[in-house]
Amino acid sequence: MDQMEPLTTDIEDICFFDTETRALPDLLDPRWGDVTQCGAGRYGKSCKVVIFRYAIGDGPIRRWDLEDFDDTLRWHDAPDDLREFRERALRGEAWFTAFNSFFDWNVCNGGIVAPSRELLFPVRTVIDTMAQAAAANLPAKLEGASKAIGRGGKLPDGKRLIGLFAPADGATPQTHPEDWETYRDYADIDVIELREVYKATRPLWRWEWEQYWASETVNAYGLPIDRHFAERAAVLADVYAGQVNVLVSEYTKEACWSVNQHVALANWVADAIEHIPEAVDILVKKYEEDEEGDGLVAASLSLARDRVEKLIVLLERIDTDKGLTDEEYDVLQLLETRLYGASATPKKFAKLLPMLTNDDRLPGQYTFNGAQQTGRYSSRGVQVHNLTRAFLGMEERKPAMEADAIEFISGLELT
């Protein structure tokens, strides 16, 4: 078995497929019925497949759909050619592919009744056309990849149709028959475009798919999370965010009320430090000539982290040398609040909670070939690659501070 060759050169060894789903009713957490909130790993256990669209090789588009949403697709009812292809895939002789396959094989494994207790589609039976498209430097969306190779893209009405049929209490084929037929056409077109993107790009070598399968195994297993800690950290982060915004309002004399008012805060700081040219230069992102041609004026301002850090250093130096005015000191305090208070990292605690599986693992966080130019992994969902590395005031551990925080969050009622 040569690792430096494609898995196959025969298109008939590939089954192109796409799925559409519907959330299960009466979920313990309603967020599990929304893939945008819980991620594909959790969602796969909270939905059923209502449309399964496929094409084997260059064969015709075939439909296997659920007309009665009170029922469930069952593998023993699948078309014969699809079941036969799966047998080949289980033997390592053929492969299924979708665009962003982690979603599709997850919902199939959780949302179609399998022939036995084994996975319907084990990891090694599936490859990902999105990863192959990314390796060819095509967009990581089927719509963009299709258009990049000169084709027409997806059916424009897809987002509306998904929103119509995917919720547990959404439309049904019986209540919206015309929309249902359009939805089925939408799935047909997805498979057609999927196949064309696959055929237009270089088949990845076996060693690349071996890495992909290892990556998806990690994605399926998930990262261990301390749920107890994350729940309380989410509460503490929410309380802290409210306190930060109170400070912003106080320092700006109610001119601003949120640490995330990027433009308003930048303008307020600029007005407050306009008499300090060195500080203004740090704040200004771009200069342009004024309308009368008498000089340069600030065209855009930025409170990006690196600029905020430089401004803090400058104002602290001025404070040491000659002291700051009350207004200048308010600016310094605002910048220090902005430096850590605007971080998105604390929000990750709340974001990961609906993504956790029943055994407190966080699945599906890595994207194979996510960075197109280099082929390295990227992160999705909680974005674990972007967890903060900076910390404030923790060079030495402060047991009293930690005890106060634990006592505070222990007294809050968690939902």
Image (tube, rainbow, N blue to C red):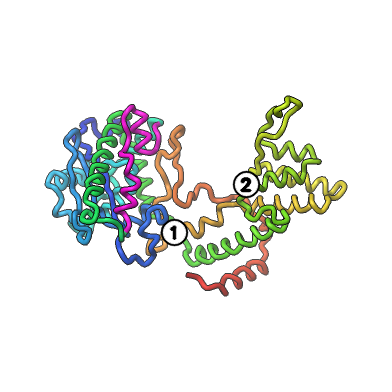
Q: Amino acid at mark 2?
A: His
Q: Residue at x 23, y 42 (%)?
A: 185
Q: Amino acid at mark 1?
A: Pro
* Along the viewing direction, whichever of 210 and 35 lies nearer the viewer: 35
Evaluate whether residue 395 shows in this view.
no
* Along the viewing direction, whichever of 75 and 366 lies nearer the viewer: 75
The residue at the far right in this view is: 322
Horizontal side of 138 relative to 243 (left or right) equals left
Q: Position of residue 280 (x, y in %)?
A: 74, 39
Q: Position of residue 303 (x, y in %)?
A: 66, 44
Tag 1 near tag 2, CB within 8 Å: no
* Along the viewing direction, whichever of 365 and 8 lies nearer the viewer: 365
Residue 159 inside the magenta-drawn segment: yes
Q: Identify the residue under disc 1.
A: 224
Q: Identify the residue under disc 2.
A: 262
> Magenta stretch?
138-167
**In which quadrant is the N terminus drawn?**
top left
**Height in image: 111 above or below 96?**
below
Circle 2 residues within 10 Å: few <14, some 14–19, many ≥20: some
Evaluate whether residue 152 shows in this view.
yes
